[in-house]
Image (spheres, grey):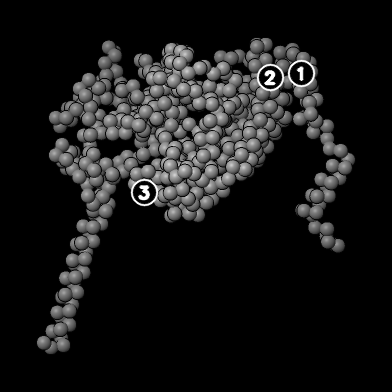
Amino acid sequence: MSQKSKWIVLMLLSLAFVAACAVIGERKGGGEAAGGSAAVSDDNKACIGCHRRQSAALVMQWESSRHGQNGIGCIECHHADEKDVDGWKHQGTWISALVTPLDCSPCHQREYDEFTRSHHARAGEILASLDNVLAEKIAGTPQNKADAVNGCWQCHGAIVKFKRDAQGNVERAGPEHKPVIDPTSWPNSGMGRLNPDGSKGSCHACHSRHEFQAKLSRSPENCGKCHMGPDHPQIEIYNESKHGIAFAANRSRMALEKEGDWILGRDYAAAPTCSTCHMSGYLSPNGVVEGNSHDVGERISWTLRPIISTKLNLVRFEDGTQEDYPDTRELPAAGATVDSTEYHVENDRLVSRTVPRQVAKVITWNERREAMKAVCFNCHNRTFVDNFYEQFDSLVTLYNQKFAAPAKSMIDELTKQGLLNPKSPFGEEVQWTFYELWHHEGRRARHGASMMGPDYTHWHGMYEVAKHFYTKFLPEVKELAARHGRGKEWQTKIDALMSKDEHLWQRGLTPEEAKALQKAYEQRYEDKRPGK
């Protein structure tokens, strides 16, 4: 064979090899994007065949998921009964577009039970709160609740509603008579969504469809969709903290993609995430895996959300529900029957009712704290952890006693005297100031201390609390009282408060303190070189 012929053969072989690699690569690439081993049952073949054309990316997501690889398909999750208000007959099968925690429960019963009793599942109860008043009424109109729809409800959840005719029947449209969903309530993946089947919540809030990736639900950014902003900046605080810094530097060492249990001290050690501290399993000193719960509040010993923080005991009932009891409230004994408040939907409205329940177990705030400390002990010794909690507790106590309790007492007294209208919670400027004092900067300070975020504790927190308490809240109280002929009375009340030790700073520094302060400033910031 001539040299020229050899080159031709080599070129042809090379081209064949490249072509083969391209084909293999294309198949492999497509398989990886689609999971490579999706198991499609006979019931789901029609769904996949059609939706691969209509919504190709959705199918690719499912194929790469553990659901897809284990034969958990469209029908298993979207199946509906004929009587379901959200169901319709599609290609011969009753389905619903809405997948609820109750739909997930046949395969994930433990997670469903834990989640259903949790704070997350009750997030939709904000619909009866001051926050929702701000969004629906003050920022909205009677006809347009777009602020609540696009804001509050996307994190907290909405009541999923359907359009109804004059007789109250659900409207249906199209050749398949599909129920017409109210666009103000869907799409919605709010954590405490109130579903037509009576369940609360949305698994999709953390486990985004249709891949349901473990690494996504374990990542802090997932929680940061809702836990952020001026009134609950947990993700910003986490990013500032030593924990967040360690995570950012070591993300590749976190085993976020591990299937199954994800255990601190066994599978990873580089940093804790939100999930680590509040939900995930950890290795105990005797080598046993503990923790791992979808009840996100089990390890929380303070409530940092209300005007005045309290320690939180937990009362768990025989029917599986539970209720937080502030440490100011008397605890019932196990076996006792007590009245418990629950919220449910009636005629597309959130209403409360009192339900008698038998107490199964009482978990004290200290027991809840020890459960959190058990996670901390994987990385820190007891002295470190106990001292951290002393620092945290002292900040909450300072906020409570110096600012929150006196401010609340004044608001309560002004309301009692008729100077504030309880039916108009934002009718006076002082009510706005008071709201931000506890709901914004007060929370930032407390959350900052809870997660070791010093800047949020002080500059975004206690600094703002103090500044607005002294320069806005108190002057507005006096101004309101003066308008109603009670100026002298309230000036006396405020003078008495300001005479207490914690407010004596207003009298000014001693000459020695003032001199030392000026000297320190000059040494740090002013150029004292000759000729300057």
Which residue is farthest front? 286
Type of amino acid at the residue the image marks with label 1: Lys
Q: Where in the figure is residue 372, as x and y percent of width and height?
A: 52, 37
Residue in front for this viewpoint, 502 or 515: 502
> For the residue labelled by badge 1, is the local secondary structure a helix, a strand or a loop?
helix
- Considering only vertical position in the picture, is 302 above or below 225? above
Residue beneath the point at 25% across and 57% down: 29
Tell me the CA gap for discs 3 and 1: 61 Å
> Within 10 angstroms of label 2, few (less than 14), some, or many (20 or more) residues?
some
Q: Where in the figure is residue 123, as x and y percent of width and height?
A: 45, 27
- The N terminus is located in which quarter? bottom left
> For the residue labelled by badge 3, is the local secondary structure a helix, a strand or a loop?
loop
Type of amino acid at the residue the image marks with label 3: Lys
- Visible in this render: residue 32? yes
Residue in front for this viewpoint, 463 or 449: 449
Left-right relation of 502 to 44: right
> Can you tell which quarter of the image residue 47 is in?
top left
Contact, CB < 8 Å: mark 1 with mark 2?
yes
Residue beneath the point at 13% across and 88% down: 2
Left-right relation of 485 to 154: right
Q: Where in the figure is residue 121, as x and y percent of width and height?
A: 41, 28
> For the residue labelled by badge 2, is the local secondary structure a helix, a strand or a loop?
helix
> Can you tell which quarter of the image residue 349 is in?
top left
Type of amino acid at the residue the image marks with label 2: Met
Q: Which residue is mark 3?
A: 258
Residue beneath the point at 50% across and 26% down: 363
Q: Where in the figure is residue 455, as x and y percent of width and height?
A: 63, 43
Q: Which residue is mark 2?
A: 410
- The C terminus is located in which quarter? bottom right
Q: Which residue is mark 1?
A: 493
